[in-house]
Image (cartoon, rainbow, N blue to C red):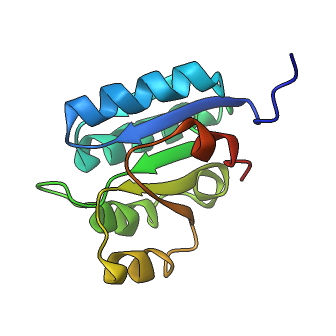
Amino acid sequence: MANASKKYRSVMLIDDNDIDNLINQKMIEAASICENIFTHSGARSAIEFLRNLEKIAKTMPDVMPEIIFLDIDMPLMDGFQFLDQFDKLTAETKKQCQIVMLTSSINPQDMSKAKNYAYVKKYINKPLTQEELKKLAL
């Protein structure tokens, strides 16, 4: 059976709500769009993880997640603060990782602000659906 969705090596979920992460992980698994899913319950740990991946990317170029699903409203470091830190990563990392804002925020200012970041390719309201995953060909 042909699947119209692109197959990715890996994706990353960043959301402080563990239930949302679990539901989104199950949706991604059901869609069979990737081989690996990295899950983080905080933006700070996710940015550190990406920095660590950068250190091994020279010898293992396929380790970076191709899509990062990013929540906006999180404690300690919110989605926009994550994007500011993401901007400090290497050009290669920024080229490899496409960011999808996946949020429950219906604030039009958040959507507008997300468009100011070149790495944000899509803005999706939770919950993640099979339909949205099929449209992901970034």
Please tell me which residue is depicted at 44% across the width and 74% down the height of the picture. 114
Please tell me which residue is depicted at 36% across the width and 69% down the height of the picture. 84
| Residue 45: percent from left, percent from top | 26, 40
Left or right placement of residue 7 versus residue 41 in this view: right
| Residue 66: percent from left, percent from top | 62, 42
Looking at this rendering, what residue extends furthest in the top direction? 1
| Residue 49: percent from left, percent from top | 37, 37
Looking at this rendering, what residue extends furthest in the left direction? 76
Front one among 104 and 38: 104
| Residue 2: percent from left, percent from top | 87, 23
Q: Can residue 34 be seen in this view?
A: yes
Left or right placement of residue 123 versus residue 63 in this view: left
Left or right placement of residue 18 versus residue 56 in this view: left
Front one among 53 and 106: 106
Q: Quadrant of residue 46?
A: top left
Q: Can residue 60 be seen in this view?
A: no
